[in-house]
Amino acid sequence: MYALGAYKDHRTRIQFNSTAAQKRAWSLESLVANPVVANTMVDTKRKVADSVRWARLEDGPRQSVGSFIQAMQRDDCSAEPPLYIHDVLFVGPRGSESATHVDSFGSNFWMALVQGRKRWRLVHPNDMHLLYPTWHAGSADVVYGVDLASTDESKGDSLCPLFR
């Protein structure tokens, strides 16, 4: 089982062994209350505007699951759904986002939004060149010059004239 969470500019992936006992419903509070889980150290990610990494996410600080969850809850993320019954959870506060990216590593999954809004922008494979992709030596990650999350279309047009 693993969970991916975010607060401010940090994202993390938490990985545990999958057992029948872990298939029971759980909450963020139950994770913090479990010393094995709460004391597990995890690597975090943070969004960096000029990053050349996938989705412009760079390594963040290493911290315990418990401190990550407590910091996330202090950052106005206390309105959580009461139960988590699936083996994957994406958690993020208001304003969480990632840069334009392609989920190219077989990460096929269903997504449900419990609260708030999520904007999806789909681009036909034949139009990917209009996003000004850049590949960097030593990395399979693609970085795009067009930020589809931006609402300032005039800025996108001036910097990337093919994208309209």
Image: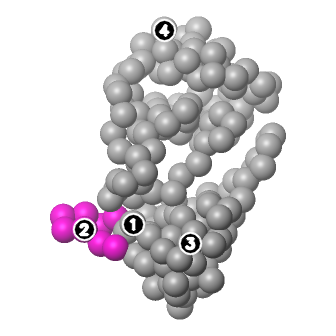
Other-residue count near label 1 (Cα within 10 Å), few / some / many at <14 / 14–19 / ≥20: many
- Identify which residue is drawn at 44% across, 70% down: 145
Q: Earlier in the sequence, mark 3 or mark 1?
A: 1
Considering depth in this image, is 54 or 148 the residue closer to the camera? 148
Type of amino acid under label 3? Gly
Question: Do the numbered discs 3 and 4 sit on residues whose CB atoms are within 8 Å?
Answer: no
The answer to whether any part of residue 111 appears in the image is: yes
Residue 35: image location, x then y, percent: 48, 8
Question: Do the numbered discs 1 and 4 sit on residues whose CB atoms are within 8 Å?
Answer: no
- The quarter of the picture where the C terminus appears is bottom right
Type of amino acid under label 1? Val
Q: Earlier in the sequence, mark 2 or mark 1?
A: 2
Q: CA distance from mark 2 to mark 1?
A: 8 Å
Type of amino acid under label 4? Pro
- Identify which residue is drawn at 66% across, 34% down: 93
Left or right: residue 155 compared with residue 83: left
Q: Is residue 129 above or below residue 53?
A: below
The answer to whether any part of residue 103 appears in the image is: no
Q: Under tag 4, what secondary structure?
A: helix
The residue carrying mark 4 is 35
Type of amino acid under label 2? His
Q: CA distance from mark 3 to mark 2?
A: 22 Å
Q: Under tag 3, what secondary structure?
A: helix
The residue carrying mark 3 is 156
Q: Under tag 2, what secondary structure?
A: loop
Q: Magenta stretch: residue 152 in it? A: no
Residue 136: image location, x then y, percent: 25, 68
Residue 137: image location, x then y, percent: 19, 68
Q: Magenta stretch: residue 135 in it? A: yes
